[in-house]
Amino acid sequence: MNERIGILYLDDEEQNLLSFQALFRRDYDVHTATNAPDAVQILNSKNIQIIFSDQKMPDVSGVEFFEMILHDYPDAVRILITGYADIEAVIDAINKGQVYRYVTKPWDANDLKICVENALEKFRRDKELIEKNKQLGEANAELEKFVYSASHDLRAPVASIMGVVKVAKMEGTDEKSAAYFDMIEKSANRLNEFATNIIHYYQNNHSEELIEEVNFESLIDEVFDKYQHLAENVNITFRKDIAANSVYRSDTYRIRMILNNLVSNAIKFADNKKQPCFVDVSVVQNKEKAVVRVSDNGVGISPQILPTVFEMFFSNTDKNVGSGVGLYIARQAVKRLGGVISASSEQGKGSRFTLKYRIRHEPDQRQYHLSPRGRQ
């Protein structure tokens, strides 16, 4: 047998309580109280889904009572009983006590029954929505874990394929075979990049910030070294310019992730017809802010596409390379660090991505833990 729905009615007039109880006691588990402390005691000991309260009472108003219990009993449906002249109380009840509706005095029995039925329906819908959201959150978490695990495990065989292709090309092949190996290598690189981006997406969402002093000089050199082999294929020159006169503290892991994605993106959209091709990374930092810019003289981005470059699975139809995830991940990582990122571009001339951060004036003493799988 299902537990009966609990209703609480707070009113300092005993006659109102008796009438209410007589009206609903057969169908519901009705509880009444003449003062706020007794009402709170009932809420603490009984399972209450619907709460009625009179507005005008000697010790506490209905609005004040609802505001008082809102934090501890947010799921209960709250209904205010008030006179026609108390419109300000109704407004306060909506703003402060988050009431579902109000009932005017003297209340009509049939109207009150309809009110209870509607309130009960609202309570059930809200509970179903909370449960569905919980299930959806759990499903999303499981899906994210699966995608992360699959992407992580996928990198090993992809790396093996790339290694075999490099060995085969070094041993010498005919022109036709070399072309096939190049195709395999490009596909493997794209697959490896996509798997890496999925891992970064997961880690950005689940790893807490690890705040430390950022050494832009060595960090940018590290990023350049990572992509040097790709840059040589299209004859790209890396350049850096750092003007920093204060210590910058942030999450080095996320800064590295952002720079990796922006530099990789610049290489993909390089214009081989230009000599020289370049990718510039500049840092301007003072006591108030840090501004990082990644610029290139590549093919650029058309004005129609530019507003969408940070969206998930963005694709530059002019040069369809990459997974379309990197810039989205970069923006999400920038947000986690409390910064902003913007893009400007002129088709045929190149692009510039600008990151702006506020300086953390005090060292962050908090200790953080990484996601279960750790950072890669």
Image (cartoon, rainbow, N blue to C red):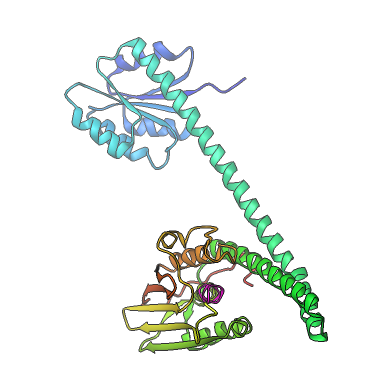
Quadrant holding the C terminus:
bottom right
Residue nearest the viewer, comparing 14 with 95: 95
* Residue 122 % position (x, y): 44, 27
Q: Residue 333, relative to residue 283: is it above or below?
A: above
Residue at 78 percent of width and 69 percent of height: 157
Residue nearest the viewer, comparing 128 with 21: 128
Residue at 46 percent of width and 29 percent of height: 123
Query: Magenta segment range?
Result: 262-270
Asked whether residue 110 appears in the rendered view, the answer is: yes
Q: Quadrant of residue 352?
A: bottom left
Q: Residue 19, relative to residue 154: is it above or below?
A: above
Q: Residue 217, relative to residue 42: is it above or below?
A: below
Quadrant holding the N terminus:
top right
Q: Answer left or right for 158 relative to 131.
A: right
Count of numbered badges drawn on the protein: 0
Q: Answer left or right for 224 relative to 360.
A: right
Residue lying furthest left: 85
Asked whether residue 46 appears in the rendered view, the answer is: no
Q: Residue 311, relative to residue 2: is it above or below?
A: below
Q: Quadrant of residue 33?
A: top left
* Residue 9 % position (x, y): 36, 23
